[in-house]
Structure formats: C-alpha cells, structure tokens
Amino acid sequence: MNIIFVGPPGAGKGTQAQIVSKTFKIPHISTGDMLRAEMDSGSKLGNQVKDIVTSGKLVDDDLMNQIVKERLSKSDAISGFILDGFPRTLNQAESLDEILKSMGKQIDRVIYVDVPENIIVERLSARRICPKCGRNYNMITDPPKEDEMCDVCHVHLITRDDDKPETVKKRYQVYLELTSPVIAYYRQKKVLFTIDGTMKMKDIEKHLIEMIKGRK
Ligand code: AMP
C-alpha cells in the first residue's frame, strides 16, 4: 500500500502517519524529519537547507525530488510506504508520478487531513519537542506530566524554530499557495480521501484504518 498524507502544517499528519505505519508495517517517510536529521548532524545538505527550513520556505524541488527518489528505492519501501510532507508542490507531485512509474508502482491513497487555519496556529504555537528523543507534546491537548519536561528523558522541551508565530504564518501561506494545488491534483485522479483532523485522535485512527482498508 503506497500512501501520501497531505494537509497544512500542524494538521497531525506525522502522528497519524506513525499509527498507519505501525498498523500496516510500512515505513513512515517524513521529508521534514529527514531534513531536520540532516540539520542536526551538521551535514553539507543540512547546512545547505537550514536557513530555508527555519524561515518556513520550501526547499528546492529538484533537491527534494532526488532525496525522495533515493529514499523510495531502499529495501524497506518495497512493499509500501507512507509519505508525509511530500509532495508539497505540483512539480513534486508530477515528479513522484515519474519516480513511481519507473519503479512500476502507483499511489493507492492520498489522505488529506483537513484542519482550519485558526486551529493550526493554536496547535503549532502549543507544540513542544524533546531535543533528546524527538517526542512531540502539545501544551494544550497532550502536555507532559511535569511542566515543559520530557516524560521519558526529563530534559527541557523546546519549540521548533519553525513553530515560532511569524514562521507559522509564513508556512501556512506557503501551504495555501503551493500545496493546495497538490490536493486538487489528487482529487482529479480520484485517489483523495479527506479526514476531519479536528476529531478526537481515537476517531481519526478508526476512520483512517477503515479508509485505507477500503471500507470507506
Ligand atoms: P514539516 O516537518 O513537514 O512541516 O517540514 C518542515 C520544513 O522542511 C518545511 O517547512 C520545509 O522548509 C521543509 N520541507 C519538508 N518537506 C519538504 C518538501 N517536500 N519540499 C520542500 N520543502 C520541504
């Protein structure tokens, strides 16, 4: 099963993709996580994209297409994958079609996680991350037991640079301008399924699994 999660930043795509990854035993490929890992390791690629990522802009299409092509050719993606954060532009969506065609594959489901802008801004400004284990918290809906400390590592939680209010606005603008056409692209191909990302996590999980199994 080859799946894409698309939706505004902060819609909960990452959390939902992890659930689907565990349930269907296919890798969760988040291009945002891949770029952050490169930045944290101080690699040449990481340094190249750092300013772009922290300002909320998009990394160059050709570079992203290359990164995803290499990742999809790894052995763990043979029997399926979940893409989260890619494609984010029409150019990336068309390039993904070409990549998959050359591998004799196709996209089975595109899941659009729909969340209105006011909730996105509220969620992203409440998001915190553990700098050690990478676990995400939300100070409103999923706070740590001890104030601003990771439940597992007991270190101070941090706010991602691109979750700061000015950058959140920029990321949302970029999403509207460049990523919403991707939703229309998949709707036209009749592979788009919409999920209401404001529902309770348990309900989202149930709907998602039914959608992917083709019962919805
Ligand atoms: P995310 O964690 O998916 O919100 O991604 C964080 C940041 O990484 C984005 O704001 C972009 O700067 C960059 N990024 C991630 N995926 C892509 C992509 N497919 N195309 C361009 N930039 C990306």
Image: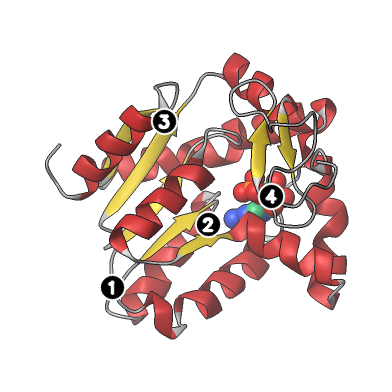
- Give the residue number, with chain letter if any, for mark 4: 152
Q: Is residue 4 left or right of residue 137?
A: left
Q: CA distance from mark 2 to mark 3?
A: 32 Å
Disc 4 residue type?
Val
- Give the residue number, with chain letter if any, for mark 1: 105
Q: Residues within 10 Å of mark 4 (few under 14, many from 20)?
A: few
Circle 4 — which element?
A: loop
- Give the residue number, with chain letter if any, for mark 3: 201
- Quarter of the view holding residue 175: top right
Disc 2 residue type?
Asn
Q: Residues within 10 Å of mark 3 (few under 14, many from 20)?
A: few
Q: Is residue 176 left or right of residue 110?
A: right
Q: CA distance from mark 2 to mark 1?
A: 19 Å
- Give the residue number, with chain letter if any, for mark 2: 91
- Return the x and y of residue 103 as percentages of the image width and height: 34, 81
The residue drawn where x is 54% and y is 80% is: 70
- Quarter of the view holding residue 157: top right
Q: Mark 2 or mark 4, which is nearer the start of the sequence?
A: 2
Q: Are marks 4 and 3 in contact (CB under 8 Å)?
A: no
Q: CA distance from mark 3 to mark 1?
A: 31 Å
Q: Residues within 10 Å of mark 2 (few under 14, many from 20)?
A: some
Q: Are marks 1 and 4 in contact (CB under 8 Å)?
A: no
Q: CA distance from mark 1 to mark 4?
A: 39 Å
Q: Residues within 10 Å of mark 1 (few under 14, many from 20)?
A: some
